[in-house]
Amino acid sequence: MARLVDTSLRLLAQEPLAGRVPASLELEACERLDEAGFHVLEVSGGGCFHAAVQRGTESPWERIRNLKRRAQRTPLGMALRGRFLVGTQPVEQDLIRRFVDCASESGIVVFRMHDPMNDPEDLVGPAEAVREAGARLHLGLVYDEGPAGHERLLARAPELAALGADRLLLLDPAGALDPSQVGALITGLRDAAGVPVGLYPQGPGGTSLSVALEAARAGADPISVAAYPLAVAGHRASSELLSQAIDGLGLESGVGQGVLWEVAELLDRALFADPTLPPPLSAHVSLQAALKGVPAGLVANVERRLAAIDASDRLAEVLDEIQRVREDLGSPPTASPLGDVIVRQAIDHVLEGRRWHYADAEMGAVIRGEWGHPPLTVDAAVAELGRAAAEEPPAPADLDAARVEAGSRATSEEELCLVALFGAGALPLLERLRGRHEAIASGVTNEEEDRIRVLVDLLEETGLGELTVEENGTRITLRQQAPVQQVVPVAPVAAAPAEAAAPAAPAGDVIASPMVGTFYRSSAPGEPAFVEEGQRVEVGQVLCILEAMKLFNEFKSETAGTIRRILIEDAQPVEFGQPLFEIDPSGA
């Protein structure tokens, strides 16, 4: 039997699809998928939590519980990034344990997790937390066709099985698996580990479907799929087509195909109802992903970042540089969150026209092995840069510190986990949730509260000012208040003095941001700014702090001169390559 794991509900809640399907339709899709006979419904993961925090409208925990109420037959699953959980920084064991407990209490039964470096040592703590919670543990190996080949994966398989894995999963985010080789690899992993082995395939142009079918022939169990519209848009194997093929071979998927096509039509109408929305992955992105061997999601990420700074014509160069950066780092996989760090470095190399002149704090941690050990040796010059860039590591995410930061805005352990993982970025979401909870009258049943939440989501998604529903003599009226959050422009620029406009600076006088993050002029609120306009600075002098996902990076000047203008307001978001300062190198 080749059982299937449906990932549609997880994909719907992460970018680029987050928010496109109304909550009511998502819940309806969940009910239908629960009837279909899947092995697991994978409903959440790192991308879902990140999108929830960024959008600030729905608790990722409440979403899991809402889906659990609809899925009474099929276990729910969550994808985790090992000791990174759903964030971009390694966290301590206490937070891992509490996060897993919160997820388990919310309805998660199966935890699928991988380490970005395929380092079993970094999965010891997370695996222990899952076992303590009494949940099922599926451990993943990220496939890569690099110099290490299949031998490294086969060597890792028994190490993962020894952590108590119920089964292993071969993950192929870059679509690099060859259909002619996958059967032998699945068999080899199963023999080496002594536990069942499944497959999570991706790949453009039907590659994922052909790989999945060959894996099914070799006994892979389970295999991940997605509803047809999501499979086509996101380079996944179609649940409808794969189940049909598996059943045709007499292997039995256990899935009812009629229900699947109904869900496909439901999601298709919702996803593509607005013709003004761009497709999740363009044909150009799909082609480049296939040509360059880079996960399509990363290609789309690069494309968006380059478009934001009017550098879309450099896409092919950046994708080539990604592979060179990987070689320098010892050929690690591009699994999340490591792939994002590699992408930032590659973009910096291409736009700056020089390689390894700078490494941010996250890249420094990768180089020094703090994120795990790569398959091969790190380039000697790059390793030296990592040692030179070593700073005192930031304090690991801590629930006590999160409690202080959140104040009264976090009233439960699951909300404290959000603050610990996402920092101040989670606070607007918590404030929104507080207002929503207070607006719902006390004394209602769980079912009534659930229905009210669906109505709240509907009100927010449609933009209506007021919504009234009457049923069985009960009338509910919801009114939407005017928004209180201010939209921040992508590239805020400080206003010039009223008495005289500042002269435009030559291109060479602009100091640009080396990363995506938040710009801070001082080390802490109330502290003096690092630099002021008109101030003389020297090479190596700190100009500002750039914060990315709770990691604070000192940004130092590579040029001596006088700061002519500060182009960004304090505590504002910045994009990679966005101008921060104008400097006059000749200024005294």
Image (tube, rainbow, N blue to C red):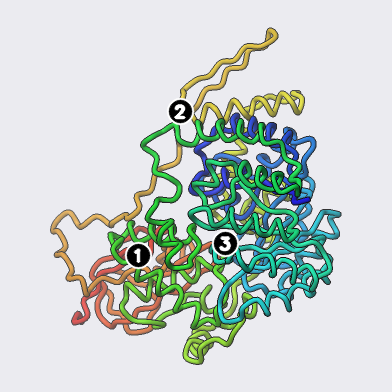
Q: Which amino acid, mark 3?
A: Pro
Which disc number belongs to residue 315?
A: 1
Element assignment for label 3: loop
Query: Residue at image x 40%, y 73%?
Result: 320
Which quadrant: the C terminus? bottom left
Say if 399 sits above or below 372 in the image: above
Residue found at the far front of this picture: 249
Residue 583: name its quadrant. Answer: bottom left
Find residue 562 and report its horizontal and vertical position in percent: 24, 77
Q: Earlier in the sequence, mark 1 or mark 2?
A: 1
Find residue 502 and report its horizontal and vertical position in percent: 16, 62
Q: Which amino acid, mark 2?
A: Gly
Q: Are marks 2 and 3 in contact (CB under 8 Å)?
A: no
Q: Is residue 150 left or right of residue 300?
A: right
Instruction: Please name the residue that numbered disc 2 is placed on.
Output: 463
Residue 537: name its quadrant. Answer: bottom left
| Crowd rating for badge 3 (residues with CA inside 10 Å; few <14, some 14–19, many 20+) | many
Query: Residue at image x 75%, y 67%?
Result: 187
Instruction: Please name the residue that numbered disc 3 is placed on.
Output: 173
Between marks 3 and 1, how big is the CA–CA gap? 20 Å
Q: Earlier in the sequence, mark 3 or mark 1?
A: 3
| Crowd rating for badge 2 (residues with CA inside 10 Å; few <14, some 14–19, many 20+) | few
Q: Which amino acid, mark 1?
A: Leu
Say if 349 sits above or below 44 in the image: below
Element assignment for label 2: loop
Find residue 148 and report its horizontal and vertical position in percent: 61, 81
Q: Are marks 1 and 2 in contact (CB under 8 Å)?
A: no
Residue found at the far top of this picture: 473
Q: Is residue 106 visible?
A: no
